Amino acid sequence: MLELRSIASGSSGNCICIGTDEHHILVDAGISGKKIENGLNGMELKTAEMDGVLVTHEHLDHIKGLGVIARRYGIPIFATEGTIRAISQTKSVGEIDPALFRIIEPNNTFQIGNMEIYPIPISHDAAQPVAYRVSHNGKKVAVVTDLGTYNDTIISELQNLDALLLEANHDINMLQVGKYPYPLKQRILGDRGHLSNERSGQLLGQLLHDKFGTVMLGHLSKENNLEELAYETVRLEVTLGDNPYKAEDFPIIVAKRDGLSQRICV
Ligand SMILES: [Zn+2]
Ligand SMILES: [Zn+2]
């Protein structure tokens, strides 16, 4: 059994729990330590029971609570060298004991408890960002957010997943007519920004297979997206896209911005 559950997902904070019967990890800690603990309590877990935190990159919506939980519980932090350096330079997370950091290499599998973790480099405006694929007992899930674009390597590394949390960040029209300043719009739309709903649906279309389980759409922008719009756009892209599947062939759910989302068990 491999479980994936979102504690928070969105432009204002990200924290995902992945676990087996014996071991649990967090992917990112971008909400307060208190919210992380509350979320885990809702799953009958505690922050102190986490075997590690995998950090995707140093943006504050991914590390806001990292300092607090590292200091309070001494949980090991797994991140690339570039991300660790950038976290150390982020004053607002406070001091973190350097001994807690575990340097990971992109494209190199490592083990936490009975889970195998594979970091996948992604294109985003951070020091050395990665997405994570986690496997246990032949089951595979992945958390893929904060990427401006994707390539064939990413597509091939995300084949045969049982479940996926995938970014559907913005609706391009909402972003374009919205109130964000022009340079920020350009940043989000750029190759090192975020996946639009359309691109998210197009990527998903390339990852489907007969045994694909559930996709959870996450990291929705608060200003430039709506749950319903992300859901419908991704569905449409899958159904109209060049793949043998229709949106109704498998569950598509949208992660809650704040609070526990539906449990995905594979
Ligand atoms: Zn980011
Ligand atoms: Zn983010």
Image (cartoon, rainbow, N blue to C red):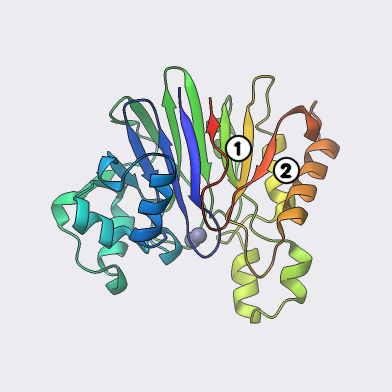
- Label 1 – label 2 distance at C-alpha: 13 Å
> Which image quadrant for residue 179?
bottom right
Question: Residue 108 in the image: x percent, y percent?
Answer: 35, 34
Q: Is residue 137 visible?
A: yes
> Which image quadrant for residue 121?
top left
Identify the residue under disc 1. Answer: 152
Q: Residue at x 56, y 59 (%)?
A: 10
**Image position of 165 (left or right of 101):** right
Q: Residue at x 72, y 29 (%)?
A: 250
Which is nearer the eye, 186 or 13? Answer: 13
Quarter of the image that includes the N terminus: top left
Q: Secondary structure at mark 1?
A: helix
Q: Residues within 10 Å of mark 2 (few under 14, many from 20)?
A: many
Identify the residue under disc 2. Answer: 202
Question: Residue 236 in the image: x percent, y percent?
Answer: 82, 44
Q: Is residue 218 above or below residue 50?
A: below
Question: Residue 208 in the image: x percent, y percent?
Answer: 68, 29
Amino acid residing under circle 1: Asp
Mark 1 or 2: in front is: 2
> Which image quadrant for residue 155?
top right
Amino acid residing under circle 2: Gln
Would you say the beta carbon of the disc 2 residue lies within 8 angstroms of ligand 2? no
Q: Residue at x 72, y 36 (%)?
A: 205
Would you say the beta carbon of the disc 1 residue lies within 8 angstroms of ligand 1? no
Q: Is residue 85 visible?
A: no
